[in-house]
Amino acid sequence: MSSLLSLLTPRTYALLALATSGGMLLGALGFQYLGGLEPCQLCMIQRFPHVLIVAGAVDLLLCCHARW
């Protein structure tokens, strides 16, 4: 149990957030540009929080790596 808890670091959370939100954005853009599906207005609005999460995760990984 303690070895599992040692994996739950801020870096792990940032990588998980980057992977999930980045994957969702890549999938949405793939459907839009490769699949030819036009996104609705709500889909466009829902992308914005994922962009912020990806930017925040990249910022954490690049700027705060010395602290971990």
Image (tube, helix red, strand yellow):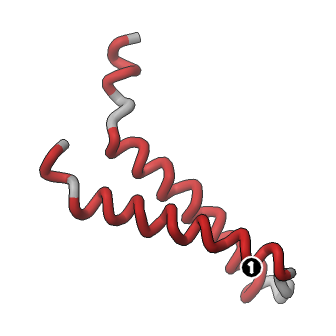
Is 57 left or right of 44, judged from the image as shown? left
Q: Is residue 11 above or below residue 2?
A: below
Is 21 left or right of 2, judged from the image as shown? right
Residue 39, image x, y percentages: 83, 82
Name the residue carrying label 1.
44
Image quadrant where residue 27 sits: bottom right
> What's the residue at 38%, 42% (across, down)?
12
Amino acid of disc 1: Met
> What's the residue at 85%, 87% (across, down)?
38
Compare residues 64 and 30 and report the one nearer the observer: 64
Image quadrant where residue 31 sits: bottom right
> What's the residue at 43%, 69% (across, down)?
55
Q: Residue furthest top?
A: 1
Q: Residue furthest left?
A: 66
Please state, as top left, top right, bottom left or bottom right, where the N terminus lies in the image: top left
Q: Is residue 19 above or below residue 35?
A: above
Please state, as top left, top right, bottom left or bottom right, where the C terminus lies in the image: top left
Q: Is residue 54 above or below residue 13?
A: below
> What's the residue at 38%, 21% (across, down)?
5
- Disc 1, SS: helix
Is 46 left or right of 22, judged from the image as shown? right
Q: How many marks?
A: 1
Residue 32, image x, y percentages: 76, 84
Local crowd size for mark 1, using a 10 Å CA cut-off: few (<14), some (14–19), many (≥20) = few
